[in-house]
Amino acid sequence: MHIPIHAPEYQATLYINQKEYFLVILQAMSDHQGHFLDISVGWSSKAHDARVYHNSSVCQKLHGGIFFPDHHIRVGDVDMPVCLVGDMAYLLQPWLMKPYTGHLNPSWQALNARLSRVRIVVEVSFSWLKGRGK
């Protein structure tokens, strides 16, 4: 999510976009109920999402195994680790799932559809954050 700002004069070119708005990136993580678990804000609008994530405290906690230590959920008769769902900007990690690309069989298409439904929860969270909740 990009947030409009009044950019500092000495760094204005870092924050301006192609429409000549000054913006910072807000990157957040929410749970399955839309509650925010982590927020990182302040990066220049020119920074790539993956770079913002890689330099965030939540990324460091995930790599260190301290964000979701030993958290599992039971789906049917299978224990599954808690994981994040991201978009194509992010690298696959043991704790991060993202849609598959290319020519997909029906099983992979079904997985992508499920991941998309999960991401809708995050999008609704951002709508509420922006004050546009329904």
Image (tube, rainbow, N blue to C red):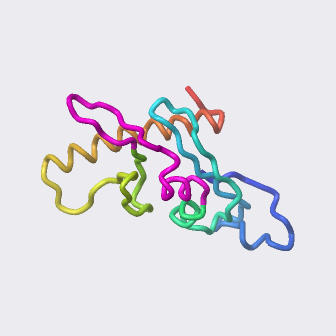
Total of numbered circles in the picture? 0
Image point (69%, 51%), residue name = 3
On the rendered image, what quadrant is the C terminus found in?
A: top right
**Looking at the image, is 41 positioned above or below residue 11?**
above
Picture quadrant of residue 14? bottom right
Along the line of sight, the residue nearer the viewer: 91 or 120: 91
Along the line of sight, the residue nearer the viewer: 12 or 114: 114
Image location (x, y in percent) of residue 92 = 36, 60
Segment colored magenta = 56-82
Is residue 73 part of the magenta span, yes or no? Answer: yes
Picture quadrant of residue 127? top right
Along the line of sight, the residue nearer the viewer: 120 or 41: 41
Picture quadrant of residue 78? top left
Q: Which residue lies furthest to the right in this view?
A: 9
Image point (24%, 45%), residue name = 111
Q: Which residue lies furthest to the left in this view?
A: 105
Along the line of sight, the residue nearer the viewer: 100 or 37: 37
Taking the image as shown, residue 36 lies to the left or right of residue 101, namely right
Image point (39%, 51%), residue name = 95
Image point (36%, 38%), residue name = 117
Is residue 44 part of the magenta span, yes or no? Answer: no
**Looking at the image, is 62 positioned above or below residue 43?**
above
Image location (x, y in percent) of residue 72 = 36, 37
Q: Which residue lies furthest to the top in this view?
A: 134
Image location (x, y in percent) of residue 123 = 50, 40
Taking the image as shown, residue 42 lies to the left or right of residue 61, namely right
